[in-house]
């Protein structure tokens, strides 16, 4: 079992991506053991029906490299949410993924 990535590192990566991608809403990242995926992203709506925040969950069993890729993947969903409002892996997702990967690769 590999050592878990420190919470401070995960916070730093999240901030870099949040600022670099210019998300339309805040993002909350938590580590939670997941059954069918290594990560999930969902948009939580406020009373006004608009996105209040993005909720990203990442499995705590991920090694550092896996956490890096899972966070990039889920943040790309948040960044491209407005273009399709779903979890499609479409072109907008791919563009956002490339941006997110570049941001984190250059800084991490
Ligand atoms: Zn996905």
Image (tube, rainbow, N blue to C red):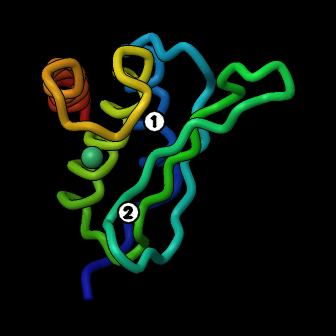
Residue 102: image location, x then y, percent = 15, 23
Residue plotted at (52% across, 44% down): 42
**Label 1–label 2 contact, CB within 8 A:** no
Image location of residue 94, percent across then percent down: 14, 26
Q: Is mark 2 within 8 Å of ligand 1?
A: no
Where residue 88 sits, quadrant-wise, is top left
In the image, residue 72 above or below residue 104:
below
Residue nearer the viewer, 18 or 74 = 74
Seen at 35% across and 42% down, the residue is 74
Instruction: Judge whether 9 appears above or below 16 on screen.
Output: below
| Residue at left offset 49%, top offset 28% | 15
**Few, some or many C-alpha atoms within 10 Å of disc 1 (few <14, some 14-19, many ≥20)?**
some
Position of the N terminus, as image quadrant, is bottom left
Residue 39 appears anywhere in the view: yes
Residue 76, compared with residue 57, is above or below; it is above
In the rendered image, the quadrant that contains the C terminus is: top left
Which residue is identified by label 1? 14
Circle 2 crowding by C-alpha within 10 Å: few under 14, some 14–19, many from 20: some
Q: Which mark is residue 27?
A: none
User: Please, which residue is most extreme toward the bottom here?
Assistant: 1
State how far apart marks 1 and 2 are (Cα).
13 Å
33 relative position to 45: left or right: left
Horizontal side of 18 relative to 3 (left or right) equals right
Q: Residue at position x 42%, y 54% from top?
A: 40
**Residue 20 drawn above or below residue 37:** above
Under circle 2, the secondary element is loop
Q: Which residue is mark 2?
A: 5
Residue 9 picture location, percent across and down = 42, 48
Q: Quadrant of residue 2?
A: bottom left
Q: Position of residue 62 (x, y in %)?
A: 30, 70
Comes first in the chain, label 1 or label 2: 2
91, 40: nearer the viewer: 91
């Amino acid at each position: 079992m590999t050592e878990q990535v420190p919470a401070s590192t995960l916070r730093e990566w999240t901030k870099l991506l949040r600022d670099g991608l210019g998300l339309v809403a805040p993002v909350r990242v938590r580590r939670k053991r997941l059954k069918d995926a290594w990560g999930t992203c969902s948009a939580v709506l406020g009373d006004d029906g608009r996105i209040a925040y993005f909720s990203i969950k990442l499995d705590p069993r991920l090694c550092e490299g896996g956490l890096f890729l899972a966070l990039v993947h889920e943040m790309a969903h948040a960044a491209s949410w407005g273009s399709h409002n779903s979890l499609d892996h479409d072109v907008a997702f791919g563009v956002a993924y490339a941006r997110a990967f570049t941001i984190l690769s250059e800084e991490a």
